[in-house]
Structures are given as structure tokens and as C-alpha cells.
Amino acid sequence: MTAEFEEAPGSAPISRRSFLGVAATAGAGAALDGIMTSTSRAATHEPSQAAPAAYYGGPDPKIPKVGLRWAFSATVFFADRVMINSITSPSGRGYTSVGGGEIWGPRLQGRVLPASGADYYKTTFNTYYMFEASDGAPIFIHNRGTMRRFQARPEPGQPLLPPTDPQSAGWTRFRATPVFTAPVGPHDWMNRTVFVADAKRQSNPDHTVFTYYEVI
Amino acid sequence: MRDFVVPKTDTKVIGEVRLEYAFQLTAHYDPARVSQTPKGSFRYQDIASGEIRGERFNATVYPDSGGQYDTVRPDKIRDVDAHFMLKADNGEWVYMEHVGYRRPDGYYRTIAYVEADTKGAYDWLNNTTFVVTAQESSDQREVVFHYFVAN
């Protein structure tokens, strides 16, 4: 695996890793609010607000590089968790409703529209609900993905192995791949960008923190 | 509409995603058949053949097992929706789906969802999220897809 780091236009010279490290070790929401999610700062949706990108290539230098750049995060709180037995899915048909939540990060701020949808999963998750951006724009999210769990803190350079105990607290991360439908206007970039997310389940209360990356 | 008070949490942490190169698919398509629909131009392209080469996965596209069922939107972005079958080097069947965007500026990225036999040699594909970048030939008949595992 190769990764190269690029400075975001207009940002201070800081590598993505140290940037993430600072943000992550700051830990408390207060610190992050101060750095990245100030609601007092008007959202301009300009790339200058974007986080630095990391680029990945292959063993052959002719393989084109693909970049990931943190776009925004969503903290989503769940309400009901229901399962009905299904003839088409060994995991049944699920209903995990979205209570509400918050969207924070460089390129999108706002909230999860309360009670706007759910994960109607069958084996793999399949979630439909709404964001409401800070400018009032309704943004539809259709989120898909497997429930392959990842270790909370992978060893650098080592592949992530499947969990030995899926119930243990260390295996609460998974990947999500959303498709957004945003109105024409400042959020239109979401209609033409592929995203991949890290998702981390949390309890007390039941919520998941999604870190959305633009694929560039 | 119901109201919701966001609880205070200390979980505002940025989760990491890293990409690891996995394999490449060189796919050959028949010419596109384009028709006008209320949503834009529907673009069907039959996948005639293809080969996957990589350290952990080698396969061929099962001929005429599907293709691309894309929509070119009024803003010229192509919504990519591809479905086809593969035969792995050991004979096992694998289903592959792509969802993403091809833009006039050359951006061609998708997510790939892959389903393999859970009792077979390629079960690892099942629970893996792939990020894909693609390069299309000028006649759009050959597309090279590069697959990265989202770790």
C-alpha cells in the first residue's frame, strides 16, 4: 500500500495523519467543535475548507492514484430496533429507525432530519433518511454496506483481519458507501462524488459516528 | 414532524479509511445503445469479455453476463450502474456490481459490491468494500477498472 499526502489549498502545512491525529486525540467534542465545526463560521462549501487528501496507488506506477479526503461526519442516533423474519434473508428484514443527529466537518454542516427514515436491512445494511444542511437544504442519503467489522485501531501497514469476537468492543467499526441526492446549488458536488465512510458504533445512547470521505 | 434533541457525546472522533490495491479488470464492451428517457439518456453497454488480474483474485468476465445500465443526466454526469458475472480461475461464480459516477472532466469512480460463494475460495470478497477508479478508451469500448480495498 502506498499513500501520499497533499496539502489542501490554503491550509497550514500539516499531513493528513497528523491532522487526523490532532483531531482524534483532541477527543472531546468541544475541541473538534472549535477546530472544525464552528457553526458561527458561514459554510462556503469551497474546497479551501476541505481537509488534506491522501492518495493511494498500486504496485505498478502506471496504476492511477485514488485519493480520499474527509468531507464531513455524521453522528446518527437510533430509535427503534426491530427485526421481522424474512424468506429472503437469513438476517431477517430489519428496521432500525433514525431518531436524529448532527452533521459536522469541513464541507457540510447541519442535522439529521428527525425521524426521517431508517435502516431497512436484509443481511447487509440499506439505509434511507434525510439530512438537513445548515442552509436548510434537504439532502437524501441512501447508505449501503456490509457489516464486516474492523478492529478499532489497526496496525499501520497491516491488513485488517476479520473479527474473532464480533461482539467485543474492539470490533465496532464498519464501512459504509452512501449515495446522496442534493438540491441544485452549493451542495450539488455531492451528486457527482463517490463517498466511502468509516462507521463506528457507540452505545449509551445508541448511535453511530460516520466519517465520510470523498473519493477523488 | 417529530423533534429530536441531540444528546451530548464525547464520540466526535474522525475514523480512518485507507485504500489497499487489490486487482484490475480490463473489460471489453459492445458499442453503447443510447435512448432518451425522462431521466436523461439511458445508456446500455453489453460486456462482451474481460479479465481480472491481481495477487489474490484472478477471473474472467462471463461473456454477455450483463453490462452497464447507465444514465447520462441533464448535467452530463453519467450515473454508473453495472452488473455482470465472473468465473474465477478455479471455476467459481462471482457477481459484481458497480455504483458510481463518470464525469466529463475524466473523473470515473465507483464503489464495487462483490458476491462470491461463501463456501468457496473467494469468500473474502463478500465482506469487502471496494473503491474503484476506471479509465475508458476514447471509443468507450475498453474500460480498465482498478479495485482498492477500503480498509
Image (cartoon, coloured by chain):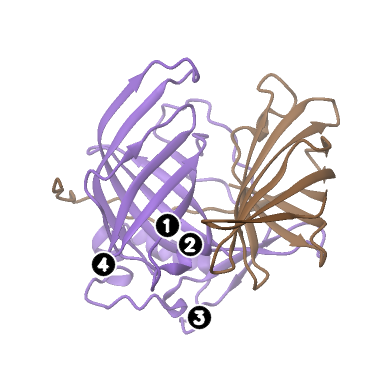
Chain colours: A purple, B brown
| Mark seen at residue A12 | none
Contact (CB < 8 A) between labels 3 and 1? no
> What's the CA distance linking mark 2 and mark 3?
30 Å
* Tag 2 subunit: A
**x and y, in percent, of residue A91 in the image:** 45, 21
The residue beneath circle 1 is A181
Indicate which disc residue A134 carries: 4
Label 2 in the same subunit as label 4: yes
| Residue at the image point whose x is 49% and y is 32% from the top | A124
- Mark 1 surroundings within 10 Å by alpha-carbon count, few (fewer than 14), some (14 through 19), many (20 or more): some
Question: Is residue B135 positioned above or below B120 on the image?
Answer: below
Q: Is residue B86 above or below residue A135?
A: above
Residue A37: give x, y in percent of width and height: 29, 68
Which residue is painted at 47% across and 15% down in the image? A87
Q: Which label's residue is closer to the chain start, 4 or 1? A: 4
The tag earlier along the polypeptide, 2 or 3, is: 3
Q: Are marks 2 and 1 in contact (CB under 8 Å)?
A: yes
The N terminus of chain A: image quadrant: bottom right
Distance between the alpha carbons at the discs numbered 2 and 4: 18 Å
| Residue at image mark 2 | A191
Q: Nearer the viewer, mark 3 or mark 4?
A: 4
How busy is the neighbourhood of tag 3: few (under 14 within 10 Å), some, or many (20 plus)? few
Q: Which residue is mark 3?
A: A13
